[in-house]
Amino acid sequence: MGTLDIDIETASPFEEPPDNSNDTRYFEFFSVSLAYASDLDDTPETEVLFRSGDWDDQYTIDLYERLFEWCDDRSVDRLLTYNGAWFDGTHLLNWARDIDDSADRDFLPRTEDLFENHVDVALAAADEYEAELWDDQHILPDWKVYDLAGIDNDSVWYDDYDFPDNYLSGIDGKAVQGKHIGQVLGDKYVQNVEAGIEHTSVHRELTQLLKDYCISDVADLINLYTALGGPSLDDTYRRPATNIV
């Protein structure tokens, strides 16, 4: 029974979203991380697909096509995300709908098919570790859940990469976070691609940092799913992505 993990990263190059907003109009599709195992005991194969051009729709279309091509080459019976019912699924559906309306594609039904057997591991983790939730929390951060489950999911640290002084100005913190991609790193990557400087050492270093971070988001998700109950979670936490908000 093939299991696929998906995690998207977004950027907000045009307007910073309001706090806690999940309105797709503030987000652009930057990358998608993938992990696949034909058996839950197997070491998953991983891939990260980055945007290959500017923020024009043609590069969103290209990213979807590469995503579907990768998934179509594998037998997928179960899709796992962490908080995908709220974030990843919502944006993938909304972007797909907009593309279908403007470019006469079939991305929306293909996205719905992909999420037909979607299990949101974050919901299972929130139930398992309910005592750890703050009063205003519905979902625990994935790093905390990995720690509680005893799974070694290493953080990605900026100090492990070689960047010029001030290249990462505007980033607060020593470890890479998803919000950093949304605020700074995603747009910086796209600007480099637009400028045709992918061959430079600084862009290669940025690409490696982003790849390492993105893979860390999916590489251990199957282990977490298994630790929380594995296939016994499927019925309770199955969340097909059919509602567009």
Image (spheres, rainbow, N blue to C red):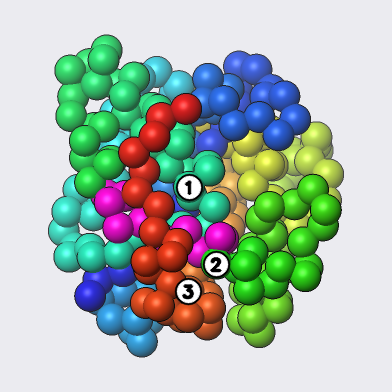
Asked if residue 176 can be seen in this view, the reply is yes
Is the C-beta separation of discs 1 and 2 under 8 Å? no
For the view shown, which residue lies furthest in the top direction? 102
Residue 5, placed above or below residue 195:
below
Per the image, the residue denoted by label 1 is 85
Residue 229, placed above or below residue 108:
below
Residue situated in front as seen by the camera: 159 or 89: 89
Q: Gap between marks 1 and 3, in whole Å?
A: 15 Å
User: Where, by quadrant of the figure, is residue 46 drawn?
Assistant: bottom left
Is the C-beta separation of discs 1 and 3 under 8 Å? no
Q: Which mark is residue 124?
A: 2
User: Helix, strand or loop at disc 1?
Assistant: loop
The residue that appears at 53% across and 78% down in the rendered structure is 228
The residue that appears at 69% across and 42% down in the rendered structure is 180
Q: Amino acid at mark 3?
A: Tyr
Tell me: 140 left or right of 41: right
Is the C-beta separation of discs 3 and 2 under 8 Å? yes
Q: Amino acid at mark 1?
A: Ala
Per the image, the residue denoted by label 3 is 225
Q: Earlier in the sequence, mark 1 or mark 3?
A: 1
